[in-house]
Amino acid sequence: MGFLSGAYGKLMAGRLVRDLQYQMTSVQSRLRSVTREIGQKEKMYQVQERNMRQQMQAQMQAAMFGYLGMPMGTSVAGMTPEVATQLFGGIDTTKYSQAMQFAQMQCSAAQTVWQNMFEMQREADLMALKDVEEDLQTEKDNLESRLQIAKAEYDAKKEEEKDGAKNLAPNYTGQ
């Protein structure tokens, strides 16, 4: 009876192992897909954020040029009031300093607002994907655990079948 029980148990355990392996392949495929999608969205947000910063800096610089009456395309980054006065003779150094402080303050405030907006948008957009990724990772871990148990059961039933087959062999010694 041990032979039949072992053989049947081995068949059922083998079937369970194959089913779990199939499920594991499916879960791993979906997990890779979601992880790839998260990475692509992260890259997209980084590019958008970089483009927005460049656009904001250009707008701030254009506003400052207009305020100071300077020709567009002039680089004022790191320019001291004295250098600006020498280059553009008619600029008042006090006016230039005030414009620089105002532009830096505006730029800083705008960057903070945009940074917060991007973070909230990124979190809202990626939250669902990260939840799916976490659920799939949990399911994968669960399947791995169940697969180990099923393989151990398969090995045990295989041994039971082998032991049962030994008992079925006729004993020709007459004992």
Image (spheres, rainbow, N blue to C red):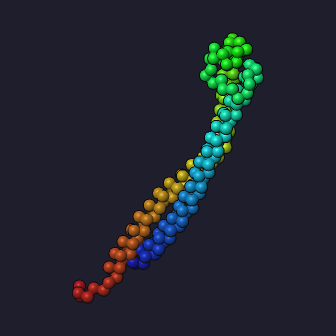
**Total numbered labels placed on residues in the image:** 0
Task: Judge by depth and name the residue closer to the eye, 26 or 92.
Answer: 92
Residue 163 position within the rendered picture, expressed as x and y whole percent measured from the top left: 34, 75
The image quarter in which residue 157 lies: bottom left
Task: Judge by depth and name the residue closer to the eye, 84 or 146.
Answer: 84
On the rendered structure, is 136 left or right of 167? right
On the rendered image, what quadrant is the N terminus found in? Answer: bottom left
Residue 4 position within the rendered picture, expressed as x and y whole percent measured from the top left: 42, 78
- Identify the residue shown where x is 59% and y is 48%: 39
The reply to whether residue 110 is in sight is no
Task: Judge by depth and name the residue closer to the eye, 104 or 153.
Answer: 104
Residue 167 position within the rendered picture, expressed as x and y whole percent measured from the top left: 32, 79
From what the image shows, is residue 42 above or below residue 32?
Answer: above
- Identify the residue shown where x is 27% and y is 85%: 171
On the rendered image, what quadrant is the C terminus found in? Answer: bottom left
The reply to whether residue 85 is in sight is yes
- Identify the residue shown where x is 30% and y is 86%: 170
- Identify the residue shown where x is 50% and y is 54%: 141
The image quarter in which residue 30 lies: bottom right
